[in-house]
Amino acid sequence: MGNYLLAVEAVDIYATVLDTNDLSTIRGSSLLLLKVPLAFGGENGALSRHVLQPADQAEAVSLGASRGVWKVTSDLAPAAIEERCRAVLDGAAMPDAADASLFEAAQFMRFVVACVPLEGDDGYLDALAAAQTRMRWNQMAGPNVRHRDEWSAVPHAQGTTGASGVRRGGNPVDLPDSAVCSLNGILPRQDMAENVKGQLNWISRSVSLRRRFGVAEKQAFYSDQLALLQDADAPSDGLAHALRDARDRLPMALHFASISEGGNLDLKENLRDKLALFYADGNGFGALQTAYIRGESTAHGQNQLARQTELDATLRTTRRRFLKALLELVHRDASGAPSDAEREERQALNWRHGGSGREGQVAIETVLRLETLLWGGDEFRFVLPARLGFDALKLFFDMTRGRHTGADSDEWCVGDRRMFHAAGLVFFHHDAPIANIIRLGDGLAEACKRKSRDQDLACISVLESFDQVGNSVEAYLAGRSPVGVAPDELLVDPANIALLVDTAKQLSVLDDGAGRRQLRQVVIALHAGGTEGGSYLAARDRLFALYPNVRGLLAPAMDAMGAHALWLLLEDYWDYLLIAAGGMATAGGTGVAA
C-alpha cells in the first residue's frame, strides 16, 4: 500500500457563492464550503464509502472553511483516487441518502482534487505544496462556473411558450414568462416555480438546491458547532434553552429585515432597519502555520503531520468558543419576540419541518438576531443588528488578546507567534444588496492588511447609500479623508474601540446635544479646508472655548488615535457608538440616545 496526501478544495468562491443576493442561497453556498469536506472525509464519510477500498485507511489532517486534507493509505493509484473523488463531488457517484442533499447541491460548487505521494509524516509540507500546485492547475484547466445540465432544461428550449398554467402542488402558477433564474438573473430557470418569501419565483436548479440547503442549515449550524465544545465551554442556561430543539423552535431570525428590528427597543429613526456586517481575516496565517509545522516556533507534535493535525484541532475549538461568545452577546440583546409577519412564517416553517406548531399558541421568548455567512479557518463573516456592531468587533479582539472573561490570548497564537487580524465592519440598511456589502467588507479588511499585517486593525464604514462606495474601496477611503489626513489614519486599532465609545458618550451629554453640533461644524470645516485651513482651526477653537473641559476629555483619545482622525471617526460613527458597549436600550427604550 502507498501513503498519499489527498486534498479537496473549493475554488472560484465568488462565482458560486455571491452569484445572487438571496440570503438563504448565500448561506447555503457558504456552509456547503464548510460541510462538504467534513462530510466527504468524516467518519463513515463519502471518502471511505465511495472512494477507498475496504482495507484502505484515511486520517483527517486539516479541515478548514473550504478545504479538507487527509492522509490516505491505499492500493489505488493517485489518479484513480482523484477520479473517484471527482465522481462524488460531481454527482456521478451519489453518496448514500444521509449525504444526498449535501452532495447534490455541491455539484454546482467548484471543488478541485489532488492526490500526491506522501514520503513520511515529516514530508507533509512538501506533499502539500505538490497538492496545491496540482489543484491550481486543475482549477485553471476548468470553467469557473458549473452549470451542469441546466442549459438543456431551459423551458423555451423544450417548447414552453409561457409560464401560465405550470403547476406546483396542484395550484396553477401565473408568473411573468422568463427563461432565467429570478434570484440571480444569469442561470436558466427550471420548469417548476418555487415559493421564496411567500412569493412564487422561477429559479434555477443550482439556486434551488443551494437555497434549500441554506434553509435547512440555518438553525442546525449553531447547535452542531456548540455541541462539539467540551462541557467546560457549554453555553449559558439561557442560550442553551434558546437553542434547544432548534429545528423545531427555529430561534434564529429568518430574514435581514427581522435581524434589524428593534423588537422592544425604542431606537432612533435613523438606526431602525440597520444591520452590521462584521468580517475578520487572519494576517499571514499561511506563513505562521508553515513555520509552526516546520518546528520553527513552539510546537508539540513530533512530526509535521502531527503538528498540522494538532494545530487544526486547536484552532477549531478556539473559533467555536468565539461563536459561543457571539451567540451569548446576541442572546443578551433584549430585542424581544419576532414581528407578527415573521411569527406567521416561523409557524409555517415549523409545520413544514414536522414541528408541533406550538409557536402558534405560545409566545416566543426571544429571537437570536444573527446570520453566519462564512465560518472556518481564519475567516469569519456575520450579520447582526447595527446596535451590536461595535460590541461584536470589541468582543472578537478582546478574545484574541485574552481580555474577555474566560478567554486565553494564547489560544489565538500559532505556536509562540501571535496571530493578528484585519477586520471590516459595515453598517447598512437591510435592503442593501448583500453580495456587494460582502465585497465591501472584504475590501475594508484588505485596506487594513495593506497598512500592516503585524497589528490588529479594523476599517469601518457607515453606508446610507451603497452608491457612496462605487467600485473602488481605495477611492472611497480616500474620499472620506480631508486634505492632510491619510486614508489609513482612519483605520482603528481595536484596542481603542472602548475609548472611542466612551468619548462619544461623554460628548453627547454636553448641553443637550450642543457638543454634537459643534463637533459637526469642526468636521465640516475640516473637509472644506483641510487640516491647515483657517475655518477648521476656528471651529476647533470655538468648541474648546465653549466647553473648556472638552480638551481634557478628548486628550486620551487624541493621543491614541490622532486629533484629526478622532474628529472624523466620532462624526462618522456617532449614533452607532452611543448604543454600543452597554448602551443598548432595555425594554421600553431606556438608555437609547435621543
Image (tube, helix red, strand yellow):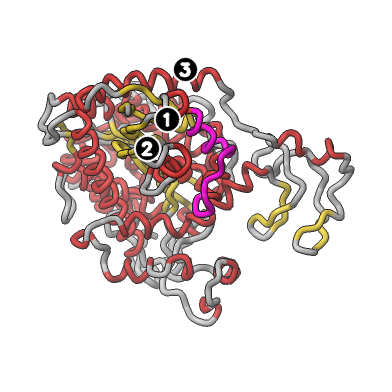
Q: Amino acid at mark 3?
A: Trp
Circle 2 residue? 424
Question: Mark 1 or mark 2: which comes first in sequence?
Answer: 2
Circle 1 residue? 443
Is 87 magenta? The answer is yes
Residue 372 — which label? Answer: none
Residue 7 rendering spot, x and y as whole percentages: 38, 30
Q: CA distance from mark 3 to mark 2?
A: 32 Å
Identify the element where label 3 is drawn. Answer: helix
Q: Indicate left or right for 528 with 540 as reference.
A: right
307 relative to 508, above or below: above
Residue 99 rendering spot, x and y as whole percentages: 50, 50
231 relative to 75, above or below: below
Tag 1 and tag 2, C-beta contact below 8 Å:
yes
Span of residues in magenta:
83-99
Question: Mark 3 or mark 1: which comes first in sequence?
Answer: 3
Q: Nearer the viewer, residue 419 or 395?
A: 419
Q: CA distance from mark 3 to mark 1?
A: 27 Å
Q: Indicate left or right for 323 with 443 as reference.
A: left
Is 582 magenta? The answer is no
Circle 3 residue? 137
Identify the element where label 2 is drawn. Answer: strand
Q: Amino acid at mark 2?
A: Gly
How crowded pointer 1 is (Cα within 10 Å; few <14, some 14-19, many 20+) is rated as some
